[in-house]
Amino acid sequence: MKKIKLIKLIIPALFIAMASFSGCEKEKIDTEPVTIPTTPFILEGCTWNLMNSDIVYIINNNEKFANCLACENAQQIDFDNKTLLLAFGVVPGGVSEVQTKLTKIGTTYTINVDVLLDFTDIAGDIWRIALLTNKLTTDDVELNVSYHH
């Protein structure tokens, strides 16, 4: 009799436990990069006040914009909805072309910069990028730069 009562208590408890764990799956972590749309931001007439090369400056407000760039006629940015990403680097020769792609894997953002070098004897040429994207909530974007001829 005691065995039957014990079984009547255990069986419902097992069903409840199985039902509560049936919806639990490990959270999938993205391992493939997802391309995040960007738009080049034209900075004609702007002076860059940035001192450190090969890092990404994440601009999410007008104050930080003014600290990084001195512009006479820059277009206005809606920082409530957009983020401006800035980066630059110095190369020993000339720069022919710069291509960019912003990607995300999991929670990590990376700007991939592909710099095509030319064979001129320009000493210390600079590449610069300014990209607008939808508002980012991170304060860390990695920079991956590749150089080739």
Image (cartoon, rainbow, N blue to C red):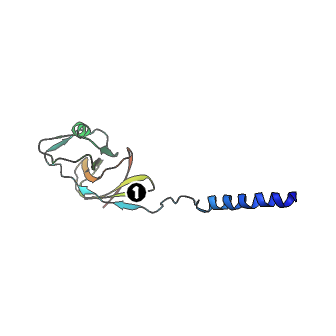
Rendering coords of residue 97 (x, y %): 24, 59
- In the displayed structure, does residue 134 sit left or right of residue 42? right
Q: Which residue is mark 1?
A: 104
Instruction: Please name whichever residue, 68 or 149, is drawn nearer the observer in this view of the structure.
Output: 68
Instruction: Please name whichever residue, 143 or 28, is drawn nearer the observer in this view of the structure.
Output: 28
Identified at 58% across, 61% down, the residue is 23
Q: For the C terminus, which image quadrant?
A: bottom left
Q: Judge whether 23 appears above or below 121 on screen.
A: below
Instruction: Please name whichever residue, 116 or 133, is drawn nearer the observer in this view of the structure.
Output: 133
Identified at 39% across, 62% down, the residue is 34
**Element assignment for label 1:** strand
Quarter holding residue 113: bottom left
Rendering coords of residue 16 (x, y %): 67, 59
Amino acid identity at mark 1: Lys
- In the displayed structure, does residue 75 sit left or right of residue 97? left
Rendering coords of residue 68 (x, y %): 24, 39
Rendering coords of residue 93 (x, y %): 26, 52
Q: For the N terminus, which image quadrant?
A: bottom right
* Label 1: how many Cα within 10 Å (few below 14, some 14–19, many 20+): some
Tell which residue pokes out farthest to the left in this image: 73
Identified at 50% across, 58% down, the residue is 29
